[in-house]
Image (cartoon, rainbow, N blue to C red):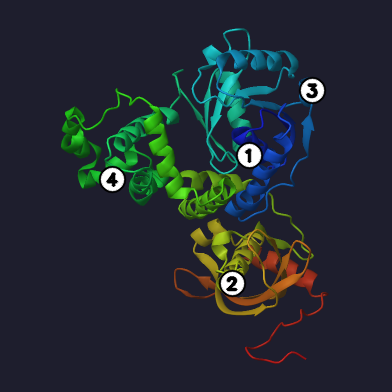
Amino acid sequence: MKAVIVGGGVIGGGWAARFLLNGWDVAVFDPDHEAERKIGEVIANARRSLPALYDRSLPEAGTLSFHEELADALVDADWVQESIPERLELKHKVLGNLSELAPENAVIGSSTSGFKPSDLNSEGARAIVAHPFNPVYLLPLVELVGDASETEKAAELLRDIGMYPLKVRKEIDAHIADRLLEAVWRESLWLVKDGVATTEEIDEAIRMGFGIRWAQMGLFETYRTAGGEAGMKHFMAQFGPALQWPWTKLMDVPELTEELVDLIAHQSDEQSGHLSIRDLERQRDDNLVGMMRALKKNNSGAGGVIARHEKNLPYIDDIDLPITVDRQIPKSWTDYNGHMNEAHYLEAAAAATDRFMEKIDADAAYIASGKSYFTVENHIRYLDEMLAGERLIITTQVLKGEGKKMHLFHFLKNADGKLAATAETLLLHVDLNTRSSSVPSPDVATKLSDYAQAHACLPMPEGAGRFVGQRST
């Protein structure tokens, strides 16, 4: 698959990274002579953050190319994304050229945050709105507006690269999300102008309170919960009258005088001017990864999108020495020194055990039927340090697989094959109803035995059977 990015700013660069790291080839057209550098920096940020959302490896990255001629970039395109400045006359010109030159079956999306498809296509173009949110390579939401068949086709492609397509039911200026953001933005400008709060205090009000709730529940579910057992009707009855009170100035906008702009700029500099934009981006990305991974555990919000996408990422099956983990180390797994914390070596090994159980059909359905394997003993050897952003690959050898016992040995390596740790684990099969040991089902026992026989010819791993404090020979 091939995506063409027209306009390589922050949003265009984010689109390029999202497609590229999900295995698409990406061609970029942007007359800015700095485009290659700027997009390269965005992609570098994406490489350190996007894979950290997942517990499986993303596809092999596609090929990135830059083109001086638009027609050359568009050859064999499946998706074309326009991300140029918000000037309608400029979009008419560019989208007209794209509609003429792009393959007929290619989706043509515009990143516009405000214009409707009828605005964009009033001079003959065939674009849909595909409005993402920054950083595009992490945040899954894309608002789709336009022809129903085209938006459905676009939605299917976007789901395959881990995004959440939201099809807007009716054309409206600024779509859905930006209209909500605009309301908060207008009120915030008044709060600064009237001296009620600084830019930092407004940001603290959002990130220390309702911003965290919104990340998992949005607006209406948050208020439904606030209504307690009586639910949404109670909340509306209790707080609805407040809508008549003169709390906000949403229909009135403060004039952006030079004095107000200087005030906001000064407060913003005091708030975070000590950090470069790249420092802020990396800090933002690390925080987003941590929060989205937390949401992923409960299949909630953006975390649910990641979990669904991850299920479609392939594992490599190899009975000789199967790969049971192939992922990137997130920053949340590291200590103050940037090295992976010892507890997460065990977490990674436990994930490898879970994956191996899936391979022998002792999976979620098997557990739901009332049977599983319980870990009774672990032994970890820490051989080398691993850093945030490094690729972690775990292979698993079956030392014993008969009767009630499953004895596994995990090799934890980096992408270069250097051994960083080993984890030996012994498990017993358990009947979850009686909470006592039992033999596995015939199908599971057979698959485990197949692995055990295949691995019987392998040498006994160094360190197998060790006890704590045992000297190396």
Q: Secondary structure at mark 4?
A: helix
Judging by the rendered image, the residue that carries numbered circle 3 is: 69
Q: CA distance from mark 2 to mark 3?
A: 52 Å
Local crowd size for mark 3, using a 10 Å CA cut-off: few (<14), some (14–19), many (≥20): few
Identify residue type, mark 4.
Answer: Thr
- Please tell me which residue is depicted at 62% across the width and 76% down the height of the picture: 425
Tell me residue 462's x, y (percent). Answer: 76, 81
Judging by the rendered image, the residue that carries numbered circle 1 is: 161
- Please tell me which residue is depicted at 61% across the width and 70% down the height of the picture: 345
Judging by the rendered image, the residue that carries numbered circle 2 is: 346
- Please tell me which residue is depicted at 23% across the width and 47% down the height of the picture: 228
For marks 4 and 1, the one nearer the N-term is 1
Local crowd size for mark 4, using a 10 Å CA cut-off: few (<14), some (14–19), many (≥20): some
Asked whether the residues under the numbered discs 4 and 1 touch, taking CB atoms below 8 Å apart as contact, a structural biologist would say no
Pick the front one: 267 or 203: 267
Q: CA distance from mark 1 to mark 2?
A: 30 Å
Pick the front one: 192 or 92: 192
| 205 versus 220 height, above or below | below
Which quadrant of the view contains residue 427? Answer: bottom right
Taking the image as shown, residue 111 lies to the left or right of residue 237, namely right
